[in-house]
Image (cartoon, rainbow, N blue to C red):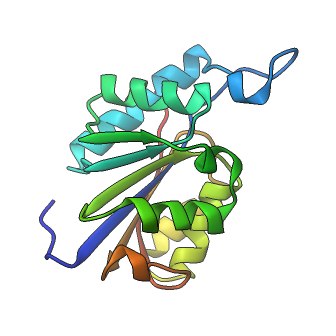
Amino acid sequence: MTLASDDKVLILFRHAKAEEGFGKPDHDRELTDRGRRDARTAGAWLHEHGLGPELVLCSTSVRTRQTWEAAEEGGACGETVEYDDTVYAGGSESVLRVVRESAGEAQVVLVVGHNPTMAALASGLAEGNGSLQAHDCLAAGFPTSTVAVLRYAGPWSGLGFGTAELDRCHVARG
């Protein structure tokens, strides 16, 4: 993907299907076999579309870490991976703040997180701007292994609600 110097891409990736939490803390839930397949398929989709982030901001939960690992097995690549508890516990405003503070000079940033935060952040950043097909996908509920690709022009510090366009939305199923 070729970007102008001030163009940015933010990829929001909801973790893949995880086991039910019976008797286990939420933070420790692991991916199911289906979740691993779906995450690998998401990684292949990212690779196929040339969406290689310079920075991956990943929740500290087991299922998000496993989602990114499986996505890498599928072909996704990230130059730097940072694990941040705010991506696990924070809402859309908090995750947006982490992106603004962490993105630095990166042009492509990917966040591996949780719902409802990922869907709310994608919807809020785009506020209806961008691809109608992508917005239809987003409106369908942002199930596990959904990837939303947003475009933004300007410094990361200026990224806010209504400033981006939703370019693509993809539900990965393996």
Q: Is residue 136 visible?
A: no
Asked if residue 146 shows in the view, the reply is: yes
Say above or below: 168 vs 31.
Answer: below
The quadrant of the image that shows the N terminus is bottom left
Residue 54 x %, y %: 25, 50
Q: Is residue 32 above or below residue 78?
A: above
Residue at 64% over, 44% down: 88
Percent coordinates x, y for residue 46 in the rendering: 31, 44
- State the residue at coordinates (57%, 45%): 113
In this picture, residue 102 sits left or right of residue 30: left
Question: Is 106 left or right of 147, judged from the image as shown?
Answer: left
Residue drawn at (41%, 41%), measured in percent from left and top?
A: 82
Along the viewing direction, whichever of 74 and 93 lies nearer the viewer: 93
Q: Estimate the x, y position of residue 96 in percent, counting from the top left.
A: 54, 66
The answer to whether residue 11 is above or below residue 154 is above
In-front residue for pair 141/8: 8
Q: Total label count?
A: 0
Question: Residue 166 sits in which quadrant?
Answer: bottom left
Q: Residue at x 62, y 17 (%)?
A: 32
Is 130 positioned to the left or the right of 86 in the image?
left
Location of residue 18 (image quadrant): top right
User: Looking at the image, which residue sits at the far right?
Assistant: 23
Horizontal and vertical percent position of residue 36: 50, 21
